[in-house]
Amino acid sequence: MGEPAEAVPAWEYASDVHVGFVGLDGVRWDGPLARYWGEPFELASPARKFITFKGQKNFTGDYWAVTSRDLVGYESWVERDAAMALDFDPAVVALASQPFRLAWVDGDRDRDHTPDYLGQPFRANLRWLARYRHPRCHRASLAALLREVFVEPQLLFAGADRVGDRMAVLPVLYHLLWRHELTADLVSGPLGGGTVVSLAAWGRS
């Protein structure tokens, strides 16, 4: 059972992408996305101001989101409805508008993009783990070794490599995460090789 490419953390493919954002300290930061991957972007202030002017055709405003218990800006009715849908989704635990600006070079052209909203990737991580929920992914010998290795929290790929061949070990590791025998932060970022994994508290002697 091979490891799909999606399991590789996204930041490994984004080494040349830069991110600009306003941090919790109110300071504007800019640098490689890989450096700031762990930042709580869901709590960041908007990376750019919402512009309003007389005669504009789009409607700007603020939507008060229960998810973030704060105002979330929008620049059209479509964006407002998107914010409302994210706020309604129980899988979304944080919501921010225009939380950062991405910049990269595409050939000889400079490109940038500021996403309208950021909702946490819990649902995507859950869908990934669900692929390994079946008991056929459980191998008792590998599971026992994984429990031993992750008594001390460490990176997902590093811990898997200590147990054996990654291609054989990862399905068992993901299965243990699904069963809550191992734990990881499934909210703050995409699940991948750089995710810190540890043995669940109830599994410790």
Image (cartoon, rainbow, N blue to C red):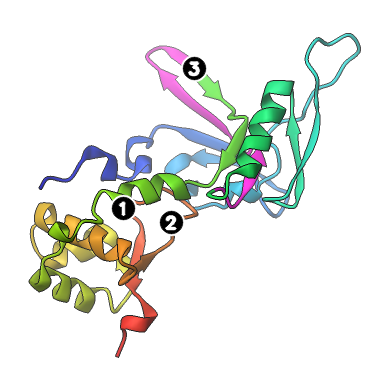
First reached walking from the N terminus: tag 1 or tag 3: 3
Q: Residue at x 31, y 68 (%)?
A: 154
* Dot in front, 2 or 3: 2
Instruction: Label 1: state its secondary structure.
Output: helix
Outermost residue, right side:
54
- The C terminus appears in which quarter of the rendering? bottom left
* Dot in front, 1 or 3: 1
C-alpha span from label 1 to label 2: 10 Å
Q: Name the spot of residue 116 as percent of width and height, x first.
A: 62, 30
What stretch of residues is rendered in magenta? 92-110
In the image: residue 80, left or right of residue 172:
right
**Residue 30 seen:** yes
Residue pointed to by mark 2: 186
Pointers 1 and 2 in contact (CB under 8 A)?
Answer: yes
First reached walking from the N terminus: tag 2 or tag 3: 3
Residue pointed to by mark 1: 129
- The amino acid on which the numbered mark 3 sits, given as a three-letter code, is Asp
Outermost residue, front side:
135
In which image quadrant can residue 65 be found? top right
Q: Name the spot of residue 103 as percent of width and height, x first.
A: 51, 27
Residue pointed to by mark 3: 110
Label 3 Cα neighbours within 10 Å, binned few <14 / some 14-19 / many ≥20: few
Whether the magenta-drawn stretch holds residue 30 is answered as no
Q: Compared with residue 145, is residue 96 higher up or lower down, i.e. above or below?
A: above
- The amino acid on which the numbered mark 1 sits, given as a three-letter code, is Leu
Q: Residue at x 70, y 37 (%)?
A: 46
163 vs 200, nearest the viewer: 200
Q: Name the spot of residue 45 as percent of width and height, x first.
A: 71, 43
C-alpha span from label 1 to label 3: 36 Å
Instruction: Label 2: state its secondary structure.
Output: loop
Label 1 Cα neighbours within 10 Å, binned few <14 / some 14-19 / many ≥20: some
C-alpha span from label 2 to label 3: 33 Å
